[in-house]
Image (cartoon, rainbow, N blue to C red):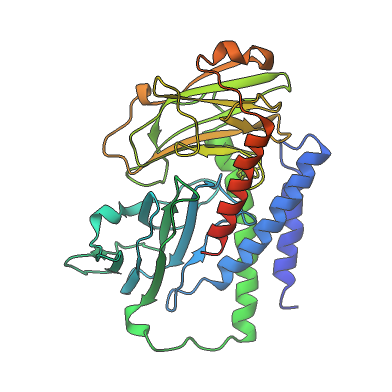
Amino acid sequence: MLTQRFTEAIHDAEKIIVGAPHVQSDQDLVEGYDYLAGSIRASLQMAWAYDRDFPYFVRSTGPYTKLGLDNPDTLYFHAWLRADAEYVVTGRRGGTSDLSFQILDGDYTPLEVPGSLAAFDDRDIRLDPDGAFRLRFGPGVSGADAFPLAPGSAMLVVREVFSDWAGEEPGTIRIHRADRIGQAPPPPTHATLGKRYAVAGKILLSRLRTFLAFAERFYLGLPVNTLTPPRPTPGGLATQYSSVGHYDLGDDRAMVVTVPASDAPYQGIQLGSMWYVSLDYINHQTSLTVSQARVDPDGMIRYVISERDPGVANWLECTGHRRGYIQLRWQRLSRALTAEDGPQTEVVAVEDLPKALPYHEPIDPAAYRERIAARQAAVAFRMLG
């Protein structure tokens, strides 16, 4: 059967889900099967988009194809490359807080983060008055908006980052191989389809193993209910810093995260499940940017992570997850961050929160529902982009 290797991979993937070390309840397993479904969809998409001669940008992750503690504020796109070919990328810069490009020498594996061969944002390219741009990638290319491909170049990743979900519009982007424009790829055959199903199976197993190991490597060795000082994001962009940690909170406890509101164009915080994917950021407030958060008069943002509703605007909902991951990101930075730019944490009883929040301002349930409605509308708009 043409699909046999893929169906075998699905069976092996189910074993990975069932045997994950953090699974302690039926709800953990239900979420694991949901994660598996999204991973199956994403793996098929990635296998069918693996064309380095006729490439096109695909969404690397989304609300229903999550991986790698995906940032709710970011649209991720990728296209595959040959290091010995020339490619043209055209598009229009939208109104988002950041638009960045990165060339990787491979994909994530359980043991390695892919090497970043080049990383830059739209400040390094020419934009027409309407935001249009044209970039060239290839071996030996030179001149304005030309970016050489080093040996081993395999993937071009593009990130569009939103701070104001409702007020920032996405742009457009397209890629083509320079010497293939106007031509067509060969039609599929049984052999090529069989290969794609096999590749999809390999992608599925690799992504599940990789990001469970990634979380173990970068998060779980840290003291619980703490966050690291800001540091360059592993495998990330040159202008991106992050602070990471993991939490473990009972229903009666809350974690207060206090961090300065940065002058960086983008700053955000998010929660993730033990499957190392974002929590439901559409129907719950599990992430916040500076634009969405309430900044106190002293210039600090005080987030409250808890299961119980604390009645504050900066509540980050655990949504039934006693344990989970936390990540703060800063992007488009013009300087290195220090510990003073980073977060401080405190775990308190929920009823003692007013004492831990010097500028405590309650928010009523109706106003909070309006915040959720705004999130739902903004994500729906982005999904059409």
Q: Residue furthest left?
A: 143
In the shown orientation, is residue 381 left or right of residue 283? left
Q: How many numbered badges does the structure rendering display?
A: 0
58 horizontally vs 90: left or right: right
The picture quadrant where one finds residue 330 is: top left
Q: Tell me where residue 229 sits by quadrant.
A: top left
From the top left corner, tell me how far across and down residue 121 is, in percent: 31, 53
Is residue 220 among the parts visible in the rendering?
A: no
Which residue is pictured at 26% across the width and 39% down the height? 334
Residue 364 image offset from top left, x and y in percent: 65, 29
**Image vertical order of residue 254 relative to residue 86, above or below:** above
Which of these two is toward me, 2 or 282? Answer: 282
Residue extending furthest toward the right = 26
Q: Residue at x 54, y 16 (%)?
A: 357
Q: Residue at x 42, y 41 (%)?
A: 234
Residue 16 x %, y %: 72, 48
Residue 125 shows in this picture: yes
Residue 233 in the image: state x and y as whole percent: 41, 40
Is residue 118 shown left or right of residue 35?
Answer: left
Give the quadrant of the N terminus.
Answer: bottom right
Looking at this view, is 352 or 186 the one in front? 352
- Position of 365 relative to 42 (above/below): above
